[in-house]
Image (cartoon, rainbow, N blue to C red):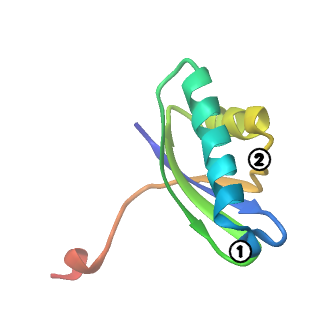
Amino acid sequence: MPQFVIERTIPGLGDLDAATLKAISAKSNAVVASLGEPYHWITSYVTGDKMYCVHEAESADVVYRHAKEGGFPADRVTEVKTLIGPQTGR
């Protein structure tokens, strides 16, 4: 299944407390469960005013649907073409 990186702008995100982040995560999980098609949230990286999420879905359209139904911004959705890391250079 294709992977996508989602860029989300959320002012003040890095200052949110653990309870708020838990509620956001629970909402995302509920939307994933309600989509009725293959979808997997892999991880998210929280910075000051941005969140970068990695999700697996059949298409970018499904990723945008997840964002819309969850009330989450999705400024940019980009398909991952290749993964590399330190092991790639060995």
Give me the residue at 26% from left, 80% from top: 86
Give me the residue at 80% from left, 41% from top: 71
Which residue is disc 1 drawn over?
14
- The quarter holding residue 30 reads top right
Vertical relation: 36 (above or below) 43: above
Residue extending farthest to the right is: 11
The N terminus lies in which quarter of the figure?
A: top left
Give me the residue at 61% from left, 63% from top: 52
In the image: residue 83, left or right of residue 28? left
N-terminal of the two: label 2 or label 1? Answer: 1
Give me the residue at 31% from left, 75% from top: 85
Which residue is disc 2 drawn over?
72
Task: Name the secondary structure under disc 2.
Answer: loop
State the CA–CA distance, disc 2 to disc 1: 16 Å
- The quarter holding residue 26 reads top right
Residue extending farthest to the top is: 36
- The quarter holding residue 83 reads bottom left
In the image: residue 38, left or right of residue 90? right
Point out residue 53 in the picture as x, y percentages from the top left corner.
57, 57
Q: For the residue carrying disc 2, how many other residues have a C-alpha within 10 Å: few (<14), some (14-19), or many (20+)?
A: some
Could you say which is closer to the camera, residue 70 or residue 85? Answer: 70
In the image: residue 7, left or right of residue 44? right
Residue extending farthest to the left is: 90
User: Which circle, 2 or 1, is nearer the viewer?
Assistant: 1
Point out residue 42 in the picture as x, y percentages from the top left corner.
45, 50
The C terminus lies in which quarter of the figure?
A: bottom left
What mark, if any, has residue 36 been given in the picture? none
Task: Name the secondary structure under disc 1.
Answer: helix
Instruction: Check disc 1 and give the amino acid type.
Output: Gly
Point out residue 65 in the picture as x, y percentages from the top left corner.
71, 32
